[in-house]
């Protein structure tokens, strides 16, 4: 008898499990979300969804019209919750959130409203994961970015994913900056967050029409990564320069293993530039607290492969290689120190120094934590860089200059 009851119980569980099934034809699979500040202070949400009727490269209908690989839908409300609810009146399918890969927030929204309530909604929603990429649309709207037809990828959301992961790119990151990073920095680590910026390359052109896909000029449809947006708690306050953004990614170990880097030639060596790939980077970033003096020590070691040289160095000699190596080390050292100092001047802790102090020096931190602002304001930054040239390329010396 017990066995019969057990079999009946299992059968009921299996039957009840099917009641929650949803047919694919009833779902609108979202790949990206954009959030803007609309007229009269309303919240404007743009949903990007994959088009099941389209194949890679576009599918022609009976009339010969090519369908896009992705569509966008817009909805408004007094807040993000109402905007999502209002979308149900204009979309014939149920919104399906688990496949979202990118969230784009306009610079205006992040400055005026802040992202606290937005993140509150996204974190609580039962279908939305925290492991998708976050971007700030610099001097633009999220709607405009999501409605940009990329020249090579199937959708703007997919294009932004690829940009983040692009090997050797100066601003590429190993995993990008995800919503879960922002949440951890903001609420657990007491670290002021940063978010990757994105902007349209050609702001004068409108690429929201599929006709632009037939134009050979790819810049019309392209977007690019910019420096990181600096947040004070949950509100955008400023932007890091490209150099400072690269330094931030190195110091926080968010960078890819190989990073493209360039510096200017010293005045006495010409007006050109030096381009190289940083490889096998090992960074140690440690705050030290001694006698109420806070110091931030940075130690960077690695190799470099020279990619371009427009400076007057004779690399056929040991002296020339040594001189070039010193110039590169000194320049990278300055870039690391400048990035930390620029953030420090704004009173922001975007490198997580306070959190490191509390973990590494718990007893001292307990005594000094009430004096954090003074400690941080007077903090000294010291960088030690040891990068050696692994390869100078096939050409040893530059061509002789014409007289």
Image (cartoon, helix red, strand yellow):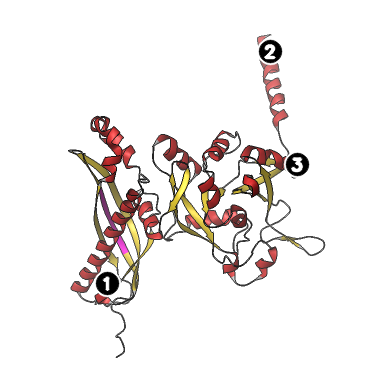
Q: Which mark is residue 89?
A: 3
Q: Residue at x 33, y 65 (%)?
A: 305
Judge by depth and name the residue closer to the eye, 214 or 352: 352
**Element at badge 1?**
loop
**Element at badge 2?**
helix
Circle 1 residue: 266
Q: Residue at x 31, y 56 (%)?
A: 338
* Residue 179 shown left or right of residue 41 in the figure: left
Crowding at mark 1 (Cα within 10 Å: few <14, some 14-19, many 20+) = some
Q: Position of residue 221 (x, y in %)?
A: 60, 65
Predominant secondary structure in magenta? strand
| In the image, residue 299 lies in the stretch drawn in magenta | yes
- Distance, label 2 to label 3, CA atoms, is 46 Å
Judge by depth and name the residue closer to the eye, 127 or 244: 244
367 in relation to 252, above or below? above
Q: Residue at x 27, y 59 (%)?
A: 334
- Distance, label 3 to label 1, CA atoms, is 62 Å
Between discs 2 and 3, the one toward the N terminus? 2
Q: Position of residue 175 (x, y in %)?
A: 46, 49
| In the image, residue 305 lies in the stretch drawn in magenta | no
Between discs 1 and 2, the one toward the N terminus? 2
Crowding at mark 2 (Cα within 10 Å: few <14, some 14-19, many 20+) = few
Judge by depth and name the residue closer to the eye, 54 or 145: 145
Q: Which mark is residue 5?
A: 2
């Amino acid at each position: 008898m017990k066995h019969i009851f057990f079999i009946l119980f299992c059968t009921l569980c299996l039957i009840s499990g099917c009641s929650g099934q949803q047919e694919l034809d009833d779902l609108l699979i979202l790949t990206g979300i954009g959030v803007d500040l609309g007229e009269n202070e309303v919240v404007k949400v743009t949903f990007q969804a994959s088009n099941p009727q389209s194949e890679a490269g576009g599918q022609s209908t009976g009339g010969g019209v090519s369908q896009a690989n992705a569509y966008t839908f817009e909805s408004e409300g007094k807040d993000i919750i109402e905007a999502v609810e209002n979308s149900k009146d204009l979309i014939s399918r149920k919104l399906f959130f688990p496949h979202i890969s990118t969230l784009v927030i306009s610079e205006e929204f992040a400055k005026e409203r802040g992202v606290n309530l937005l993140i509150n909604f996204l974190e609580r929603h039962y279908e939305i994961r925290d492991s998708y990429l976050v971007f700030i649309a610099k001097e633009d709207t999220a709607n405009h970015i999501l409605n940009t037809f990329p020249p090579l990828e199937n959708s703007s959301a997919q294009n932004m994913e690829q940009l983040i992961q692009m090997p050797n790119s100066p601003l590429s990151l190993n995993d990008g900056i995800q919503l879960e990073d922002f949440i951890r920095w903001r609420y657990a680590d007491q670290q002021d967050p940063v978010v990757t910026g994105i902007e349209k390359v050609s702001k004068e052109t409108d690429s929201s029409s599929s006709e632009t896909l037939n134009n050979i000029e790819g810049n019309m449809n392209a977007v690019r990564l910019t420096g990181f947006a600096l947040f004070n708690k949950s509100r955008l306050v400023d932007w890091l320069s490209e150099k400072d953004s690269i330094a931030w990614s190195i110091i926080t170990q968010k960078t890819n293993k190989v990073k493209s880097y360039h510096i200017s030639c010293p005045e006495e060596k010409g007006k050109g530039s030096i381009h190289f790939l940083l490889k096998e980077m090992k960074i140690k970033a440690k705050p030290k607290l001694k006698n109420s003096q806070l110091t931030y020590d940075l130690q960077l070691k690695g190799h470099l492969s020279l990619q371009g040289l427009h400076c007057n160095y004779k690399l056929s000699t040991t002296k020339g290689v040594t001189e070039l190596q010193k110039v590169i080390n000194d320049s990278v050292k300055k870039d690391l120190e400048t990035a930390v100092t620029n953030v420090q001047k704004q009173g922001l802790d975007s490198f997580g120094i306070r959190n490191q102090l509390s973990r590494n020096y718990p007893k001292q931190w307990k005594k000094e934590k009430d004096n954090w602002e003074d400690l941080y304001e007077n903090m000294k930054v010291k960088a030690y860089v040891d990068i050696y040239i692994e390869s100078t390329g096939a050409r040893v010396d530059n061509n002789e200059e014409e007289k």
